[in-house]
Amino acid sequence: MATADVTDTGAPVVTGMRCSVCGAAVGIGEPLSFTCPASTPSDRRHVLRFESRTVPFRPTDDANPFLAYRRWLAVDAFGAALGLDDAERARIIADLDARVARVAGTGFVRTPMRRADELSAVLGFSDRGGVWLKDETHNVAGSHKARHLFTELVHLVMAERAGVAPWKDVSSRPPLAIASCGNAAIAASTLAAAVDWPIAVHVPVAADEPVLAMLDTLRADVRVCERRAADPAGDPCVLRFREAVVSGAIPFGVQGTENAWCLDGGRTIGWEMTDQIAAEGRMLDAVFIQVGGGAFASCVGASFATSGLHPRLHAVQAEGCAPLARAWERALATGGAANAGPRWAECMWPWQSPRSLADGILDDETYDWIGVLDAMASTGGSPVVAREENIVEALRLVRDHTDIDPSPTGTAGLAGLVEARSSVGDDECVAVVVSGVRR
Ligand SMILES: Cc1ncc(COP(=O)(O)O)c(C=O)c1O
Ligand SMILES: [Zn+2]
């Protein structure tokens, strides 16, 4: 028997990328592989996902999740394919993290996840079960968003280091670009400032003053995007962002359809949850994740597939903006919730007039819906649409019964648990991510 076939060499786990819509394959060593080759600026309905080998889930003991779970990250496989050796790949991550820490006041460290005892009691859970809150409010830039963006940055820096980036040197780097007026913009501008990389941030006319002030401090090039008479339907910030990308800017946002590398780092949240609940000798029965563009829930769902933990994934939207729940119903009616990518036009289209207090999840379209549906289908989960009163109640519950200081978007996952409480057993262990701090 050839032992080489069964020996785990410790090599990176991700083997390639494949479009969930048209099936196109992209090599893992392809530099700047942000979108499917069939995706165009006027039709972004394609999304690349990572394909992995199955190996035992044994992270290394490091406070920084990008080092602890490096072997499972697609950027590690990317760097290896470019010829960067193991030590060099680890050094790039550690160096970037140190730079981030200088700007953000903290580098990336595993965020705490604890059973919220008072909240669990208020919600009627027994001592056998309860609600575990993962607190992302002290993560880099005050939300989980920087995790998605960090792997985009690592990808760019590894491409530079290996000499395969299409620009000559650091001084001729094209600008980064993002369309966002909230946590993603702050996180992207923080990472950009950490490496002195120019960034254009496309914001709506109604952007919040505190966010604009913060972007200014981070030296972002803020572009206020009014709707122009000739604009087609859709968010003018996204239109201007795509124009910037067509002119050579690098997509640096948190939508997998614009840059698939955001779907890599977001998985560290779920991997941490896997380890943290195991350390308590428990198993998670269900996880409730709030959904805007869907990258967050898609990543948490994908993380469970590689770590071997399979709690039910419940994707939570507010009643005032629920295109994902509609897509779930449409997918079930047209052939099933799994592998629905080729049925994009039948399942996912923009929601009219989104509204909720949870303003970070008002994306009219759930760009990363395919991964979320796949994860819900494979774990026996389902979407939850939270009534607005429960969006308000979830915020109050966390503010009154924990020491976390969240935003309404940050507690929207809990709103889903409150909404679906009668179908969750009192003995079940349920996790929720408090994803963003009060601004
Ligand atoms: C605090 C917070 N939580 C959750 C989300 C939703 O993440 P996604 O857009 O990836 O679904 C956002 C998005 O802006 C956010 O800011
Ligand atoms: Zn495609």
Image (spheres, rainbow, N blue to C red):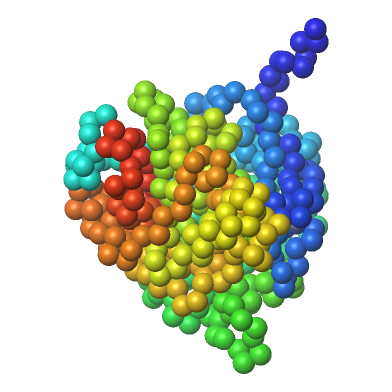
**Is 437 left or right of 27, judged from the image as shown?**
left
- Please tell me whether residue 133 is drawn above or below residue 194 in the rendered image: above
Residue 117, quarter of the rendered image: top left
**Is 325 left or right of 95, judged from the image as shown?**
left
**Is 439 left or right of 198, judged from the image as shown?**
left
Identify the residue shown where x is 57% and y is 54%. Answer: 332
Identify the residue shown where x is 59% and y is 69%. Answer: 349
**Is 420 left or right of 216, judged from the image as shown?**
left
Residue 257 x/y as whole percent: 65, 60
Identify the residue shown where x is 66% and y is 90%. Answer: 230
Residue 241 x/y as whole percent: 63, 72
Residue 385, quarter of the rendered image: bottom left
User: Front-most of 400 and 81?
Assistant: 400
Identify the residue shown where x is 22% and y is 45%. Answer: 123
User: Front-most of 25 and 103?
Assistant: 25
User: Front-most of 121 and 41?
Assistant: 121
Figure quadrant of the C terminus: bottom left
* Residue 344 visible from this viewpoint: yes
Residue 384 x/y as whole percent: 41, 55
